[in-house]
Image (cartoon, helix red, strand yellow):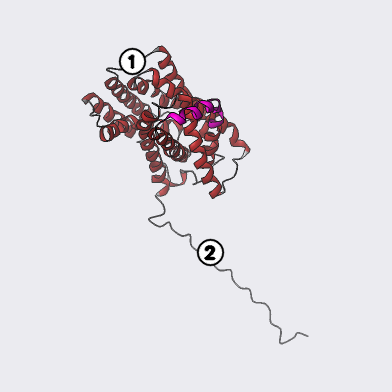
């Protein structure tokens, strides 16, 4: 006999799934414009570094300047990492961080400072600017990156502009075989460091890659600690402040924004972006040092910017192709 008070359970229908929220007009673009803005911050700060190196380099030797710059950068980055609780990079990232730290943060900074004492600024600019070409070639060979015609054409135009800027700055300068060799070594270290860093960014954040790469570079430059201590006592305050500026902004900030942008594009395309640096250096020297550029210098700077625009043009990635923010 059934209990009249008992009723069969009534199945409660599951509520329909909430419709997927459509992205707001202000939330979708960041994947597009943030990497470009980060790359812009990098090239502006790297261009400003040339003005500061002129002051700091007159009081500090190449190794001491590199070590002081890296120590300042590592200190700032370490504090930021501690505040953000970033922690150590995963094991898979350490090999690339070590290679990029030694090559790019260590060897590149020392030999470039040294090379610029042996050759004039124009020759150094021309030789070091083979770096983006090496990055594209190494990226294609080691990372399997494509080399689209627009990228190659843009790099050719930008390199021609860098040569024009270099020639216009080399009139009264000097060059030596040692200086040219050092600038070539700097370009090779720069290219190797960038290509080594690219796979790191699949495992570690841009801040982690930059912090520990900078720290490894500083450790590699520790043999110059005696020079740094001795020269710091005799250096004018302006030179020391410029060295600290190099560590905080063109190193700590600019290398982090570089890594952020590099994680979201190819090494070859990021390398081509740095061809904007010579044009910005010309403009900054004009505005801050009253160095009026020659017509050839202006034409070369315009070619550099044109080549960068050409190398970054072409098919845009679909919205889902951007790497997730780190």
Element type at mark 2 = loop
Is residue 146 visible from the viewing direction of this image? no
Residue interval drawn in magenta: 217-235
Q: Is residue 188 magenta?
A: no
Furthest residue in direction right, as rendered: 1
Residue 242 location, x and y as percent? 40, 35
Furthest residue in direction left, as rendered: 295
Q: Residues within 10 Å of mark 2 (few under 14, many from 20)?
A: few
How many marks overall? 2
Residue 250 location, x and y as percent? 42, 36
Whether 238 is drawn above or below 326: the answer is: above
Residue 247 location, x and y as percent? 45, 36
Residue bearing the label numbered 1:
174
Residue at x 46%, y 20% (from the top left corner): 185
Residue 319 location, x and y as percent? 43, 47
Furthest residue in direction bottom, as rendered: 4
Earlier-in-chain disc, 2 versus 1: 2
Residue at x 71%, y 83% (from the top left corner): 6
Foreground disc of the pair 2, 1: 1
Quarter of the view holding residue 234:
top left
Whether 50 is drawn above or below 90: the answer is: above
Residue bearing the label numbered 2:
17
Pick the front one: 165 or 224: 224
Pick the front one: 245 or 32: 245
Pick the front one: 8 or 214: 214
């Amino acid at each position: 006999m059934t209990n009249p008070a008992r009723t069969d359970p009534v199945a409660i229908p599951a509520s329909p799934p909430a419709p997927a929220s459509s992205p707001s007009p202000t939330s979708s673009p960041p994947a597009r414009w943030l990497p470009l803005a980060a790359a812009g911050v990098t090239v502006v700060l790297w261009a400003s570094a040339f003005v500061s190196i002129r002051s700091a380099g007159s009081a500090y030797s190449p190794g001491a300047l590199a070590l002081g710059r890296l120590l300042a950068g590592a200190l700032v980055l370490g504090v930021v990492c501690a505040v953000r609780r970033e922690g150590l990079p995963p094991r898979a990232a350490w090999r690339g961080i070590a290679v990029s730290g030694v090559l790019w943060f260590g060897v590149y900074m020392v030999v470039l400072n040294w090379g610029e004492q042996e050759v004039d600024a124009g020759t150094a600019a021309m030789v070091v600017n083979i770096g983006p070409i090496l990055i594209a070639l190494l990226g294609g060979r080691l990372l399997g990156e494509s080399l689209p015609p627009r990228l190659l054409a843009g790099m050719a135009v930008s390199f021609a502009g860098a040569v024009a800027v270099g020639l216009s700055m080399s009139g009264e300068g000097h060059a030596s075989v040692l200086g040219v060799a050092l600038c070539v070594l700097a370009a090779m270290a720069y290219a190797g460091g960038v290509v080594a860093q690219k796979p790191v960014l699949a495992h570690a954040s841009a801040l982690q890659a930059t912090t520990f790469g900078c720290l490894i570079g500083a450790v590699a430059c520790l043999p110059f600690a005696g020079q740094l201590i001795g020269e710091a006592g005799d250096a004018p305050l302006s030179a020391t402040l410029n060295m600290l500026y190099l560590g905080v902004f063109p190193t700590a900030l600019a290398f982090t924004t570089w890594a952020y942008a590099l994680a979201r594009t190819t090494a070859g395309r990021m390398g081509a972006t740095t061809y904007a640096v010579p044009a910005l250096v010309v403009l900054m020297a004009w505005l801050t040092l009253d160095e009026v550029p020659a017509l050839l210098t202006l034409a070369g700077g315009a070619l550099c910017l044109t080549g960068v625009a050409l190398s970054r043009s072409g098919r845009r990635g679909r919205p889902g192709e951007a790497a997730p923010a780190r």
